[in-house]
Amino acid sequence: MVTRLSNYFLRTLREDPSDAEVTSHKLLVRAGYIRRNAPGIFAWLPLGLRVKAKIEGVIREEMAAAGAHEVHFPALLPREPYEASGRWEKYGDGIFRMKDRKGADYLLAPTHEEMFTLLVKDLYSSYKDLPLAIYQIQDKYRDEARPRAGLLRGREFTMKDAYTFDYTDAGLDVSYEKQRAAYERIFQRLGLSYVIVQADNGLMGGARSEEFLHPTPVGEDTFVQSAGGYAANVEAFTTQPRAPRSYDGLTPQEVVDTPNTPTIETLVAIANANHPRPDGRSWTAADTLKNVVLALTHPEGGREVVVVGVPGDREVDMKRAEVAFAPAEVEPATEADFAKNPGLVKGYIGPWSAAGAVLGEESSTGIRYLVDPRVSDGSGWLTGANIEGKHVLGLVAGRDFAVDGIVEVAEVQPGDPAPDGSGPVTLERGMEIGHVFQLGKFFAETLGLKVLDENGKLVTVTMGSYGIGVTRILAIIAEENNDEKGLIWPETIAPFDVHVVATGKDEIAYTVAEDVIAQLEAAGLDILFDDRPKVSPGVKFGDAELIGVPRVLVVGRGAAEGQVELWNRRTGERETVALADAVDRLVAER
């Protein structure tokens, strides 16, 4: 098939769009693949749709190979199924809600677990119908507070979501592995490097959860990995707790004056100056217990203040805190929160109070006190005394203060030990391109999806959920495949097989180009032909480089002598070859 630029819906831009932050956003707009309609919302133009369709084609082929069947749900959905699952409230401000003219509530679907579950419930009733795998490729909608980076973080995006249905846990394990293997084949075919990491399930619930992350500096996810093979999102990383220690030989706690020490740095400095350690080494931030006040807003609307104790050489990671306290929303405590809790003395907060709180009694603040796993029984700390200008030395966990629980909110640092014992971890940046979950029975139980087993007994179906971000993948491929001149698509998803450019004022170039195109089309190649008669060679060459078809055939001044120029945008090679050789090579390389 031949597409002629003289009547193709395409306009390229020479300047980067002012709102573009990353390379993929700049080039996809400049090359005429997408256009911005609103923050995080884009129109798809003919070139963009062609690449998107190529990616979807790879996904469909591998889903079919994994035994999955395609369906398609509406994006506009009623409130009731999401209310039944509890996610109407749990999503908070993250979804688009609306009412119809009769006052009924609807939402633009952020994901479709409820609808898939109800569809299978409506049609299937026996274990003989299972296992089942169904999927869709459909647009999703999330009310991102800060949409950014073009297609990498938008409010509307295309996603492939698949779901498996089994009546035994063993069956779910088999279905999960099939989908997981299909994902690996998809990403390999698309030329995307990936790391499979342990992940948190979030609002999805369920058991096993893994993310496919593409390592990239523009990634918004941080993951950890060890040389021994461990990999996890920082949200799913678990800290190895310190073993409890005996209280024998530990000195009593001591309240000391520490004026003007509202920070860990100032506290360490004054401790080293005025209160040297008995073991002779210097105090460090790791010896201090930092107590951070967080405010939790629960789904039902209540607001709770909690204090979390972490080693002083670490900050609280808010993404880990969001996971730890889900479904509540988490933020640092405000001045209003402190005003309502006068027992919290800023800069001097601690788990123990000189006013008399002891093990087993209510904390001096009267609010929940949670600690990092490193704060184990028998560990001693330098921390706040809950009195202005005072800290306490040698405060021992378990002996001098009790806690209300353990919480994983401290930042992960390079060198932390992997929880599986495979060595220290490093921190890397990545972008999520796929996620696989073992949902288990939550949605089936909630929505009543049961089947009769071999014994005629009703059993609850167990489910898996598997997502791929189609439009995000397109942007990531663009982000990784470009140079200073424009895009350079991999052959598997390029919008065309060959970009033919006819240049010059001599009609012979266009005549030869038409002949070449006929031969290429007969061989089954998909061709973009720049046949614009009054456009300069420089503009045509610039557009060819910007659009990013990896193989470019230039028919120009040498056309009369049977010579053409072949460009390989992936290698940067350009060579003059005989016309017949050019056709043979392009056909052979397709």
Image: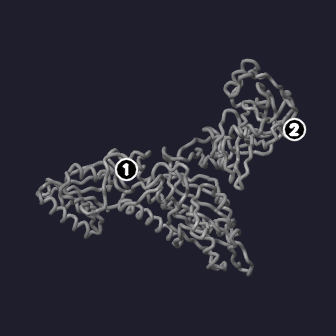
Which image quadrant for residue 311? top right
Residue under label 1: 27
| Screen quadrant of the N terminus | bottom left
Which of these two is toward me, 249 or 16?
A: 16
Q: Is 304 displayed left or right of 203 in the figure?
A: right
| Residue 46 x, y percent position in the rendering | 35, 62
- Which of the two labelled residues, at mark 2 and mark 1, occupies the earlier sequence position? 1
Q: Is 568 displayed left or right of 144 in the figure?
A: left
Secondary element under disc 2, as helix, strand or loop, is loop
Which of these two is toward me, 378 or 293?
A: 293
> What residue is rendered at 37% in x and 60% in y?
45
> What residue is rendered at 63% in x and 57% in y?
91
| Screen quadrant of the C terminus | bottom left
Could you tell me the amino acid type at mark 2? Leu
Secondary element under disc 1, as helix, strand or loop, is helix
Crowdedness of circle 1 by 10 Å Cα count: few (<14), some, many (20+)? many
| Residue 550 x, y percent position in the rendering | 32, 55
Q: Is 369 displayed left or right of 144 in the figure?
A: right
Q: Is 168 displayed left or right of 577 in the figure?
A: right
Which image quadrant for residue 365? top right
- Residue 542 seen from this side: yes
Q: Which mark is residue 359?
A: 2
